[in-house]
Image: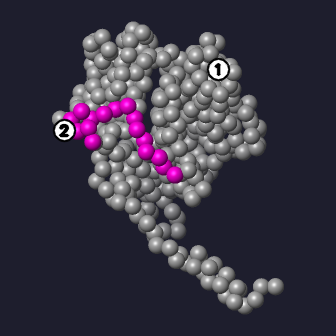
Amino acid sequence: MMNGKYITLLCGIIICLEWGCTKPYAPPVVAGSNNYLVVEGNINTGTDSTVIALSRTVNIASGIGSIAELNATIAIQDNQNQSYSLRSTGNGRYVSPLLNLDPTREYRLNITTTDGKNYISDYVPATASPPIDSIGFTEQSNGIQLYVNTHDPNNKTHYYRWDYTETWIFDAKYSSTYISNGKTDVVFRTVAQQIYQCWGNDISTDIELGSSAKLSQDVIYENPLVFIPSTSEKIESRYSILVKQYAMTTDGYNYYALLKKNTEETGSIFDAQPSTLTGNIHCTSNPNLPVIGYVTAGTTQQKRIYVDNTQLPNNWIATYPYDCQVDTALYCRPQLSTCFNEVLAYLVPAGSITIGAIYKGGPSPIGYTFTDAECGDCSIRGTLIKPSFWQ
């Protein structure tokens, strides 16, 4: 039996843990003024465009993810002294159309930023990705897990990386039948003015890697990509994912594996601690200045699939992201001493979305129902334009 001394000690420990006997530690890096260049992209030696993204790191405490690096000068260089310029498309993205580069050469990036600093990546060989065999999903109790299958019949690739773009159809909470005429009243909404059905899209943010280095055959089977909860509106109607596959060198794979550990697998005392991240890009103007990123080169492969709601359990119901309510606006409320035209006051000005008409024993409406814009206008969160690839 535990005596009083130990009970008192145990209670003291519990109180100390509960009320925080330890002081929060804010390392200097949180509030530091670091502004390092971040380079992301693959030099495409095949029939696809090369897209390089440049950004700057920001303080963790700022709450901002990153800042785009604008107006830089970027060129692809090979080890035979050939150079190919990229053009800026805004927001830190620099693009070159398909170049059909020689796959037997090695390539690097040469970057000059507006502050006059020059950055050069190491020469890397061009790697050719084998085709994606298939993309599929497994149904779980609370959603679907999408995966990718691939293999290299020549048994040479072994290291893979994937990114993806998601697209889906979703609906507004309420369908709007009427629209303000911008003057004194509301009128029927035309087909061209519908705002009920939209397409949403998203890009991968996690680092997706796979390796067959420890296997006798270069086969990747059901490598997880993304999990979609059963309540997500991504799968309320029709969903599509476009997966792009990259073949990696050993060094490139190790860099991304370490980056994944540092960014996705830390946060508790049981996780692996962050490790020093060394990429293949260097500042020639200041060799001691850190640069974040790893430039790769080679051909890529891609594949798209669609998932229809009819393929999924019929008791899965999407959760709308907003708390939506319906209200009414009448031309005149009889209980008021003076007639107040709520339609003119609430529905003609921009902001509210008119849903339907209210009738009471006559051919003309006495008012309308309406809701907030985020509940009746899907274009706030998506696009009304059907994507060109959509089937």
Q: Position of residue 228 (x, y in %)?
A: 64, 40
Viewer-closest of 43 and 317: 43
Disc sitting over residue 146 in the figure: none
Q: Nearer the viewer, residue 135 or 321?
A: 135
Is any atom of residue 100 visible in this view? no
- Residue position marked by numbered label 1 in the rendering: 218
Q: Residue at x 51, y 62 (%)?
A: 333
Front position among marks 2 and 1 = 1
At x 30%, y 11%, the residue is: 80
Tell me if residue 92 is in the magenta stretch: no
Marks counted in the figure total: 2
Categorize mark 1 by other alpha carbons within 10 Å: few (<14), some (14-19), many (20+). Answer: some
Q: Residue at x 65, y 84 (%)?
A: 9
* Sequence-wise first label, 2 or 1: 2
- Residue 339 in the image: above or below residue 8: above
**Predominant secondary structure in magenta?**
loop
Q: Secondary structure at mark 2?
A: loop
Residue located beneath label 2 in the image: 115
Report the amino acid beneath label 2: Asp
Identity of the amino acid at label 1?
Asp
- Disc 2 from disc 1: Cα separation: 45 Å
Crowding near the residue tagged with mark 2, few <14, some 14–19, many ≥20 C-alpha atoms within 10 Å: few
Q: Is residue 172 left or right of residue 105?
A: right
| Apparent side of residue 148 relative to residue 249 in the rendered image (left or right) | right
Residue 282 counted in the magenta span: yes
Q: Residue furthest left?
A: 116
Q: Pinpoint residue 10: horizontal percent, then vertical percent.
A: 67, 81
Q: Nearer the viewer, residue 214 or 141?
A: 214
Looking at the rendering, the stretch of residues picked out in magenta corresponds to: 273-288
Percent of width and height locating residue 348: 41, 49
Quadrant where the C terminus is found in the figure:
top right
